């Protein structure tokens, strides 16, 4: 029987028969719709570790604190009348923290404060500008030197520098002296020796000594200001001696 081309026969889909397959019953655990787990608490320290402030340089920080307290008392409780913008020591600094020429009443042999003034002058300052100018360098260089050489040797070097500067200034000059600038220059010169090997002199030490001490010698010959270039020079020489002695094995941390 002929089929029309325009109306092709519709194909029939195959028929499938499904039969149930017997299976043994299995007990399945109930599946929860949601799985909840405890969320650990959030601590900022997990991402940003907590940082502790440490008293990393006891000698330098204690020296800074003592000098700051002295200057605070000297400019407030014991402050003297002074023109605006002019720094000069108050009653506390002139009494305890200033070294005077030998032969004066303040430096008489019968005065027990004479011996204290020979080194305490390094803790007195004429004002806040004088204090911050010195301790900007001390806080920058001091912790490095204390870490390198130790706290006790640094105390010894500070004390000897202040004592020698006070004795020489009281012997050679008619003007009183106060401030830690000698200790600043001791630290500047000593810091250039921190990486020196035994039996060697770093070129950086020679350059620093020439620049800083040469400048102070030049200013001492030409300047007429109230800054004691002599204390700077003595402090720098002391720093060079300490650095050389330690680098050759005479000093140990």
Image (tube, grey):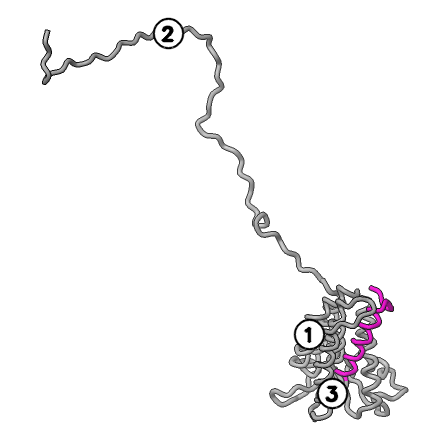
Residue 232 among those drawn in magenta:
yes
Which of marks 2 and 1 precedes in the sequence?
2
Mark found first going from the N terminus, 2 or 3? 2
Q: Residue at x 84, y 72 (%)?
A: 245
Residue drawn where x is 9% and y is 14% of the image: 4
Q: Nearer the viewer, residue 64 or 22?
A: 22
Residue matched to label 1: 137
Q: Is residue 43 or residue 151 the one in the foreground?
A: 151
Q: Secondary structure at mark 2?
A: loop
Residue 161 position within the rendered picture, expressed as x and y whole percent measured from the top left: 81, 78
Mark on residue 20? 2
| Disc 1 secondary structure class | helix
- Does the CB distance between marks 1 and 3 fall below 8 Å? no
The quarter of the displayed image where residue 191 is located: bottom right
The residue lying toward the viewer, choosing from 71 and 196, is: 196
- Give the numbered dot on residue 217: 3
């Amino acid at each position: 029987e002929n089929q029309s081309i325009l109306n092709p026969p519709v194909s029939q889909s195959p028929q499938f028969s499904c039969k149930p397959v017997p299976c043994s019953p299995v007990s399945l655990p109930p599946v929860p719709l949601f799985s909840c787990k405890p969320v650990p608490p959030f601590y900022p320290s997990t991402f940003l570790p907590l940082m502790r402030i440490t008293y990393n340089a006891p000698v330098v920080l204690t020296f800074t604190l003592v000098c700051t307290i002295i200057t605070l008392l000297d400019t407030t409780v014991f402050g003297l009348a002074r023109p605006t913008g002019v720094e000069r020591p108050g009653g506390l600094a002139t009494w305890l923290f200033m070294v005077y020429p030998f032969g004066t009443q303040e430096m008489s042999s019968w005065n027990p404060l004479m011996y204290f003034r020979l080194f305490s002058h390094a803790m007195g300052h004429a004002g806040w500008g004088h204090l911050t100018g010195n301790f900007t360098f001390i806080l920058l260089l001091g912790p490095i030197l204390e870490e390198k050489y130790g706290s006790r040797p640094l105390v010894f070097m500070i004390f000897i520098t202040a004592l020698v500067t006070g004795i020489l200034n009281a012997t050679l000059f008619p003007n009183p002296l106060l401030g830690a600038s000698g200790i600043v220059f001791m630290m500047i010169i000593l810091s250039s020796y921190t990486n020196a090997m035994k039996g060697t002199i770093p070129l950086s030490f020679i350059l620093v000594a020439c620049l800083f001490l040469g400048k102070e010698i030049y200013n001492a010959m030409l300047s007429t200001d109230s800054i004691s270039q002599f204390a700077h020079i003595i402090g720098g020489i002391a720093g060079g001696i300490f650095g050389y002695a330690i680098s050759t094995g005479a000093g140990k941390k």
